[in-house]
Image (cartoon, helix red, strand yellow):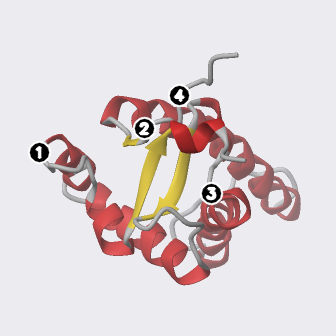
């Protein structure tokens, strides 16, 4: 039996929907970074943690962000923000992504942010609405509209 999802014409998502999901995920990441900071504050006897010069602290923060994105992408193809906005990360062939694709996507997304977000804005001119990291990782984010019941 064919699912309703198969019958709906899927499209690569618009930048606005991506940004909304990123804002949602950003709030979740801030909470996780706060929790990851607590042990460092405790080790300093309650004193604030300075990121400059504290390599271990910086590495932990990056690992938290990495684990959030790559973990969700590998587990379900969507972060909590993507789930809220009905977005799904897939390969360009329509399947689940693998560890290599998730890693390429994560690090390429960092590059997409560097030139004032140009890698994301690129989707406004791309014929398929793909970002730089979509292209480099051979993935895309698809919007699945709410199914009529």
Q: Is residue 45 above or below residue 129?
A: below
Q: Are marks 1 and 3 in contact (CB under 8 Å)?
A: no
Task: Give me the disc on residue 145.
Answer: 4
Q: From where the camera sits, is residue 26 visible?
A: no
Which is closer to the viewer, label 2 or label 3? Answer: 2
Element under label 4?
loop
Q: Mark 2 points at which residue?
A: 9
Near-viewer residue (20 or 92): 92
Q: Are marks 4 and 1 in contact (CB under 8 Å)?
A: no
Q: In this view, does 58 lie to the left or right of 112?
A: right
Near-viewer residue (108 or 126): 126
Q: In this view, does 6 lie to the left or right of 31?
A: left
Q: Distance between the residues labelled 4 and 3?
A: 16 Å
Which is closer to the viewer, label 4 or label 1? Answer: 4
Task: Give me the disc on residue 77.
Answer: 3
The disc, 4 or 3, on the residue closer to the chain's N-terminal end is 3
């Amino acid at each position: 039996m064919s699912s309703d999802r198969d019958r709906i014409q899927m499209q690569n998502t618009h930048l606005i929907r991506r940004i909304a999901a990123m804002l949602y995920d950003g709030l979740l990441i801030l909470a996780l970074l706060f929790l990851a900071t607590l042990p460092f504050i405790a080790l300093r006897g309650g004193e604030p943690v300075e990121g400059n010069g504290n390599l271990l602290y910086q590495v932990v923060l990056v690992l938290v962000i990495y684990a959030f994105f790559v973990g969700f992408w590998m587990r379900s193809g969507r972060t909590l923000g993507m789930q809220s906005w009905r977005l799904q990360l897939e390969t360009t062939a329509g399947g689940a992504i693998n560890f290599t694709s998730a890693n390429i996507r994560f690090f390429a997304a960092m590059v997409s942010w560097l030139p004032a977000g140009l890698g994301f804005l690129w989707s406004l001119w791309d014929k398929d609405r793909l970002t730089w990291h979509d292209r480099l990782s051979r993935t895309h984010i698809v919007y699945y509209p709410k199914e009529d019941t």
